[in-house]
Image (cartoon, helix red, strand yellow):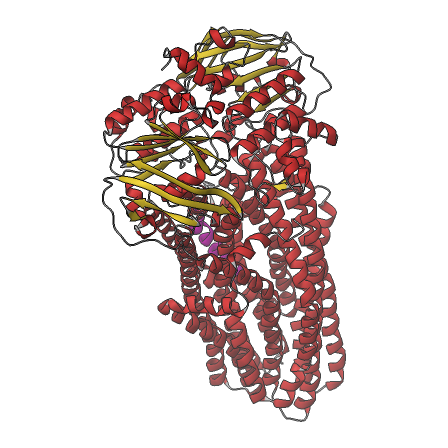
Amino acid sequence: MSTGYDAVEDQYIKPVKGRKTMFRMIRDVLNLKRDATVFTISVVIYAIGGVLYPLALGLAINSVKAGQIRPLLLYAGLFFLFYLIQFFSNIWINLSSVKVAQGVIKGMRDGAFKKLQSVPLDFYSNVKLGYLISRIANDAESISDFLTYQLPSVISGVTTIIIAAVIMFDLNTKLALYSLVVMPVLAVYTLAIQPRVRKNYLATRRALAAITGNLAETIAAIRTVKAFNAEAQTEGRFGNLNENNFKANMVATRLTSSYSSVIRFLEAVGIFLVIYEGSLSLLHGQISLGILVAFIAYVQQFFNPIVQLTQLYNMYQNSMVGASRIYGIIDSTPEKMKGEIDVASFSKSIKVNNVSVRYDGNVALKNVTVEIKKGECVAIVGRTGAGKTTLTNVILKFKFPNEGDVLLDLKELNEIETNAYRKLIVPVLQEPFLFNGTVFENVEYSKRGITKEEVQRLIDVYGMSEIFRNLPNGIDSPVGELGRNMSEGQRQAVSILRAFVRNPEIIIMDEATAQIDSRSEKAIITAMRSYAKNGTLILISHRFSLITLSDRIIVLEEGGVVQEGTLNELAKEEGTFRELYKRSVSSYVSGTGGF
Amino acid sequence: MITVGGPNGKGMSKTFLGVFEPVLFARPYLKNGTRLFILVITAGVISNVSLLLVPVYIGQAVSALQKGTFSSIPNIGLFIILAYAISSIVNFIVTYGAQYISQNYALNLRKDFVAHLVRKKFLFFETQTSGDLLSRGSQDIEQTRNFNLNMFTNLFPTISLIAAAFILLFLISPEFALFLLFVVPPLIYLGMMSSRRQRPIWKQIRDTYGKLGETLQENIVGQRVVRGLAAEKQEIEKYNSMTQEYYVENYQVVRSRVFHNSLMPLVVAAVSSAILVIVGYEDLLNSYNVGGLVSAVLIFALLTSPVSFLGRMIIFSENSRAAIGRIKEITGTGDEEFVEQSQESLSPGILSFDHVGFRRGDRIILKDVTFKVMPGEFIGITGKTGAGKSSLVNLITRYYEPGSGSITFNGRNTRDIPLSLLRSRISIVPQEINILSGTIRDNILFGIEATDQRVKKAASLASISDFIESLPSKYDTMVGERGLTLSGGQRQRIAIARAVLRDPLLLILDDATSSVDPDTEIAIFENLKRSMKDTIILMISLRASALSFANKVLILEEGELKTDVGGEEGLNVNRI
């Protein structure tokens, strides 16, 4: 926590700096032409109404003093009229500001979300989930608060100050100067404490972020916490952060509370000066009583927006930081090499040609060449860290090789349009990810319009009905968040179904049946091979039983291909394969009566 | 406990009092707060009354000027400064005290929230999403804290301001006070109307906000699936339609309240205009001095801005009430289990299942399972996916309760063993591994204290010590969200070290080595068997190589147990 909460991500995302953020947000606001216009006009009208009513009040009082009924009625009428104007303009401000605010953050959220679908996948290993959620979900909210509530205050505050100053100087220059005499003091004081205010504020923000982070982790790990009876320790860890947050907030409050007390005192001095000097002027007949009353009201009015503006500074900073980060996400570089060639079919082979891949300088694959023909079932085996998953990532176009290329029917993968390519090849990944919904909804996700009957039929075809036997409502059972209501094996089964219903040309299964028993696994693979006759299958597995189902085996070690051949060939050969599957190979050999 | 309000509160007074639901809810979290409470409220009253005195003095100054008695002006000026000074000092107490109360409230509420949360039963978490629980514990609590703060800094002061204004106006002239009386009923009415109209929409907004977060989270976690299935467009459409819904609901809530809220300050202004005309006319006819009139109109002017803030208070209040409902679902005591430390101890013994049955809903998960395991035995459990393997082990640690039969350890029914004891002496390595942000050491310790030597020993038994030693910071390497990303096999081995460190009487490995390669897997098993002589090890696995290591293998078929002989020859792995 000491190195700043979001430091890592900020390095990677590069938030837009300083004024640029503000201008960009203004541009976003102005893009909503109609709403922005209505908003600005109504705020200005609102401010004008507010500035003018003390004048009407003063003039009305003058009329009372002068004994004139008609002007009294006129000015009292104006007095009410200005409030009425405020009433209507306030309605318009409310309606237009919510449209502006929500419009802007909708744009930001949509933009960020869209970009997240096209950034390189490496992005997600640098930028963590928590960061993205708190930017796109929470920070966007604070921007919306700023635009809905604070921005109208800023605009009307500035307008009020300008108009009030103009009126005051127009009415009486000397008195205007007297009433403004405390302003420099206020300004100096405000500027002087601002750095401390900001520092305190950042501390509270960090303290709260730490609480939220800890809570998120506790919730995610709740099953482990319970398994190890670590409830009390978890509470303790949270308790410390909770206390820190309390302290940070109290430190910040001490300063801001004393600040607002000082402001109020300065306001008193301002009013005192106006009354004192005003009454002298009144005695000398330089101003009327009504004008003096109006002036006192102005001094009070003057202070309100200034107090507000200083309080707003934090909110402003806060939402600017939030906005700069969201813009940072929106501006992230999308994946290059989206490709343009449209492919509709797969006819010959997919070839990994002399490919090397490095992660942060570590070699994951070196000079790997593998060719898989249409209709083949190839198993890729090797120890943990041998480069199996990297190889699938390269084939899936999730990872671009540093050297070499992948050829689909002799066309370079980099030049093939990614979406078209992914209609041909479907992965079933190591960690089965499910959306929160029912089993059926998860399958439907990859093929819209598929019926429940069809899904049920496929489950039977693939021999999966037993796997789902304990689900309370069959395929209509909710899988829970991230599929947690089901066992890992069930999740894998859903994830396999999801790929199969697409009926793709090529399926890559990366340890996709590790938690499914070998008999079900065999049923699935066999059914699949007879169901999709010309389907191409790439299996990555530790498991011997699965390997026996393949036509050909490729053995990886330390990022390179070390062996290649059929099971019979490799079982005879000295090498990594025999070492890996000593026991299984011997029982296989004895089980089948030798070769 | 809450007797007033509620979304279906009948009758006007009930709905109106519902505004104070947050106060009632907050009471238990404001321990020893009564004195501070009274202090802050009193300070708020004093601050506002002294502020209201300012227009009165101004009025006096105006009268004095009208009469031409300038000599009293400096005194009046000093009074004004004095009134402001009092108000500003006292105001410090209000803002600081209110912040203290609200932060203290949040501190205690959060503590209570987490205390209840970690004690909820397993089943509870199956029906919740983590995003939703998080937003209850963070945003919802902040929401109610914010309302509490505003209650002290705005709501109570505004009410006292109106009361004080009434008294002052009455002192100046009873006629003015009468005018103020006209204001109060319409204000209450408008406030109620506004709150009633926006309540249902706020609920929707909160739900939509929750869904937005969940969708985003799912999309990010499942990004490879989204890309792999070329479903980006589909996802973008889904998200855009939700942000659109959010936009519309936010607009609706403003539209539902804007008229009534804006009307509130206008009511005050209308009355002060009426005073200006009526009293001004009387003054004019009778050539009274205008000081009183000026005071009255300025007092009314002072009221407009807090009154319009009342509208904002209604928004906060509605928000806060919605949040309270959600928080209560956690801080309520339902669905909890007793996990406090116990003095009892447990020694090695036989684990026995006696005709255990378990069902979820209508589905039978396990039926009539009976078996015994001796200390030091290494037992494999296998069976088809969905056969009930995980359910079986989850019954031992009482994540779920068996429907029939009994499970005993060392002769004691697990029901009678305190949960804290049961779970600290039985270690389970689940399918889903959680790595917390912190160092590798923290993750192996996971809440208990142990010497470095023991941590290293545990790591070496789990065959992960070589890897850890190869890292530059070794056991102090940061992992989790903000640290090094570990592979599946590494995570599993850290989790095994975590379990082993506790020196359990019963170690459950729920497919805990599925991402570890077969060689290493066997090495780990050998280590465990060698070093944990009295420990029962139950290993769920589908791998023949792993099962062949066990003394005995239990095979589950559709919830029923078939025992198989151990060892390499007897193992009928091809059958499963």
Q: Place residue B42 in its image quadrant.
A: bottom right
Q: How many marks?
A: 0
x, y percentage for residue B128? 48, 34
Q: Is residue B355 above or below residue B363?
A: above
Q: Horizontal placement of A112 versus B483: left or right?
A: left
Q: In the rendered structure, does residue A525 fall within the stretch colored magenta?
A: no
Residue depicted at 67% across the width and 78% down the height = A271
- Residue B249: x, y in percent? 39, 52
- Give how far across and how far down residue A102 sits, in percent: 42, 58
Q: On the picture, is B339 further left or further right than A9? A: right
**Residue A45 in sight from this viewpoint:** yes
Between B65 and A553, the one nearer to me in the picture: A553
Q: Position of residue B207 (x, y in %)?
A: 44, 44
Quarter of the image with the C terminus of chain A in it: top left
Q: Magenta region: which residues?
A: B181-203
Q: Is residue A177 above or below residue A541?
A: below
Residue closer to the observer: A512 or B312: A512
Q: Would you say the magenta stretch is mainly helix, strand or loop?
A: helix
At a point 47% along the width and 6% down the height, the residue shown is: B570
Whether residue B181 is visible here, answered yes or no, is: no
Figure check: B469 above or below A10: above
Examine the rendered structure and indicate whether residue A233 appears above or below residue A29.
above
Q: Residue at x 44, y 37 (%)?
A: A389
Is residue B195 one of those drawn in magenta?
Answer: yes
* Nearer to me, A397 or A205: A397
Q: Is residue A42 left or right of residue B175?
A: left
Residue B222, by quadrant, is top left
